[in-house]
């Protein structure tokens, strides 16, 4: 992002193979809705990944779609949509660029899925759910601490 020359930024993942019309389509979506993201649909390339597809569909794809959340594999926004300096500072230390971007950017999730092939080896098949678990645990901890701080603040005002 620091070396990009334009104000409109398009994020993607290196494991997502883009159809020929992808950039034009998501750019047109931006013109219609502002910051937008598409929804991934993870398709396994090995038996374990295939077995985990329902987990990815329910915990990944459906949650992103229903919650207007970001998939870093396909999102477009402009620099002034976020606090870029603070975001870049945190980006250097994060486990999840998608999760961090969710904290800084509101998007409209367009009603379109994109196939993302996953797995292939046991390591690749296990890596994704383990990473998601780590990210979810971190988010849960932050939310829990935030609720406790708010409760303490409310009690102090009484």
Image: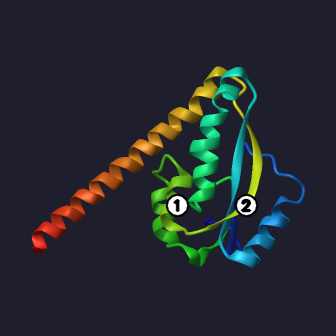
x then y, percent, for residue 70: 60, 58
Residue shown at 69%/54% (left/top)?
Answer: 39
Residue located beneath label 2 in the image: 111
The quadrant the C terminus occupies is bottom left
Where residue 89 sits in the image (x, y, percent)?
46, 61
* Residue nearer the viewer, 155 or 127: 155
Residue 114 pos. (x, y %): 77, 50
Which part of the image, by quadrant, shows the N terminus?
A: bottom right
Q: Quadrant of residue 154?
A: bottom left
Dot 2, how many residues are within 10 Å of its Cα: few (below 14), some (14-19), or many (20+)?
few
Q: Is residue 11 placed above or below 129 in the rendered structure?
A: below
Q: How many marks?
A: 2
Disc 1 secondary structure class? helix
Could you tell me how far apart the alpha carbons at marks 1 and 2 are, in whole angstroms? 18 Å
Seen at 60% across and 43% down, the residue is: 58
Nearer the viewer's eye, disc 1 or disc 2?
2
Q: In the rendered view, does 61 fall on the left or right side of 87?
A: right
Residue at 30% across / 52% down in the picture? Answer: 144
The residue beneath circle 1 is 102
Would residue 12 be visible to someone looking at this image?
Answer: no
């Amino acid at each position: 992002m620091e070396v990009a020359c334009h104000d409109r930024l398009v994020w993607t993942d290196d494991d997502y193979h883009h159809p020929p019309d992808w950039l034009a389509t998501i750019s047109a979506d931006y013109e219609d809705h502002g910051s937008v993201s598409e929804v991934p649909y993870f398709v396994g390339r090995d038996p374990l990944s295939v077995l985990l597809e329902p987990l990815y569909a329910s915990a990944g794809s459906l949650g992103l779609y229903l919650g207007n959340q970001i998939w870093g594999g396909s999102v477009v926004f402009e620099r002034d949509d976020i606090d870029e300096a603070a975001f870049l500072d945190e980006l250097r230390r994060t486990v999840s660029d998608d999760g961090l971007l969710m904290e800084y950017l509101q998007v409209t999730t367009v009603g379109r899925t994109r196939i993302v092939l996953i797995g292939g080896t046991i390591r690749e098949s296990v890596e994704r759910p383990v990473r998601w678990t780590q990210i979810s645990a971190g988010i849960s901890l932050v939310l829990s601490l935030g609720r406790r701080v708010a409760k303490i603040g409310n009690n102090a005002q009484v």
